[in-house]
Image (tube, rainbow, N blue to C red):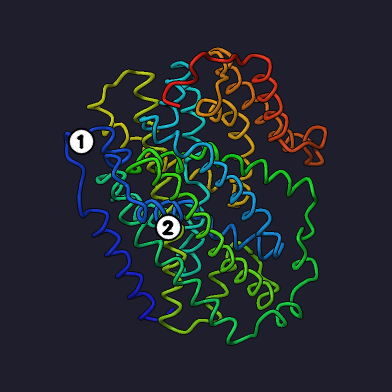
Amino acid sequence: MHFVDYSLIVIYLGLLLFLGFYRKLRKDSSPAELIVGGRMLTLPAFVASLVSTWYGGILGVGEYSYNYGLSNWLVFGLPYYLAAFLFALFLARRARQSEVLTIPERLYQVYDNKTAVAGSVIIYLMTVPAAYVLMLGVLCQYLFGWPFWLGVLLGTLFSIVYVYLGGFNSVVRTDLFQFALMFIGFIVLLVVLVSQSGGLDFLKSHLPEQHLTWHGGKSHLYIATWYIIALATLIEPAFYQRCYAAKNASVARNGILISILCWMAFDFLTTSCGLYARALLPGLADPVSSYPALALQVLPAGLLGLFALALLATVMSTVDSYSFLAASTFGNDIMQRLFSIGENAVTRWTRVGLVLSTLLAVVFAVFFRSAVDIWYAFGSIGTPALLVPVFFSFVGKRRLPPRAALTSIVVCGLLSLAWYVSSYINPEGAYWLGLEPVFPGLVLSILIFLLFSRKQPGGLPNS
């Protein structure tokens, strides 16, 4: 990289810190101001924040599109558009009208405190940003030549330092900036690729045949599993937090619908660039680095720095959001419900949670070393545990009794966890009965709901 490229990155980091520190939390800030910014999120801020937060797995997308081609759209695109549409249709308005701050607060509102605590622990683990911390380490390795551990530590530090002092509003201000950068960088890269190498004819002649098929060589069951995992969107804390923070219910619903269009546009850019990476760099040893490797080969000084900003902005916007989600879950839900710490101590314990979630993210990143594996593992375990109890806490007139809801969360989560671990125990590396771990837990959760749910006269609270 050229001095110009490094200068752009330094300017970006300076602006990021300025935006993040622009307005710090007051010492007497309420939990609502800390966690949802006082519920004043406008439509443009809603869209920019949600789009940039939910697309932090940029290197994972590059890894998958490099290995399996167009099927990236059917695995990491279409199922999530459908799930987000369901969220907008059934949950966005209800979430905003519930006037709670977090998913566990809704579990407490509808079920009881034990159910809320169990849900809090799972949500905390699901929001620890391990996959995105991993990507920061890989990015810094490629762009700056740093050791992986140094990239993880410094990249994460820059992503969370302003969150520590500014809370949710700092996340939103920086997301607006990062939203613009992520689109600009990938548009520039794709334009350069097409102008230098050619369009579809070039890709057809330089890609393996399966890369232009809908399945990319993966089994039907594997692809179907991702459609089930995508249902985790219906319990996605980042969605609920933005809905709780929206000025009104219309902003929440319309913001998600507009975000879907933005994700579709960005998926076109990222999948196209992933195909070019495979065509131009067929022997790449580490596919998770396909985007930075491609940029280093084709972009001149200045444009390379701009694309580096796009990658950094995409990942860092997710690290700060999920670190804050994990931290607020720790402070507002786990500590408050287990130890009754009181509202005045929520900010202090949220900051403690921010440090703990960062350390845990580093441990997970070093253990897995694959973003896709991290998504798969936590999605396969968290989705069966929470999907049914959370969804039906907002939708319909039937609900589980508190004890059944708690049983569903704990038992179904543990069942899928055991199923996931079975691949490490089995000498052949296969899951029990050949079933993906998300299915047994989810089927049991649905059965528990069908057997034990009861119709509630007058519906659910604030539904």
Left or right position of 293 against 1? right
Furthest toward the left, the residue is: 27
Label 2, on which residue? 150
Can you tell which of label 2 and label 1 is closer to the viewer?
1
**Residue assigned mark 1:** 29
In this view, the residue in front, 1 or 56, is 56
Three-letter amino acid code of the residue under disc 1: Ser
- Location of the N terminus by quadrant is bottom left
**Element class at badge 1:** loop
Q: Residue at x 52, y 31 (%)?
A: 122
Residue 331 vertical placement versus 51 (above, below): above
Indicate the quadrant where residue 286 lies.
bottom right
Closer to the camera in the image, 311 or 97: 97
Is residue 283 placed above or below 88 in the rendered structure? below
Q: Residues within 10 Å of mark 1 (few under 14, many from 20)?
A: some
- What percent of the width, then of the height, locates residue 400? 57, 17
Q: In the picture provided, is 267 more to the left or to the right than 424?
A: left
Task: Identify residue type, mark 2.
Answer: Leu
- Name which quarter of the figure residue 71 lies in: bottom right
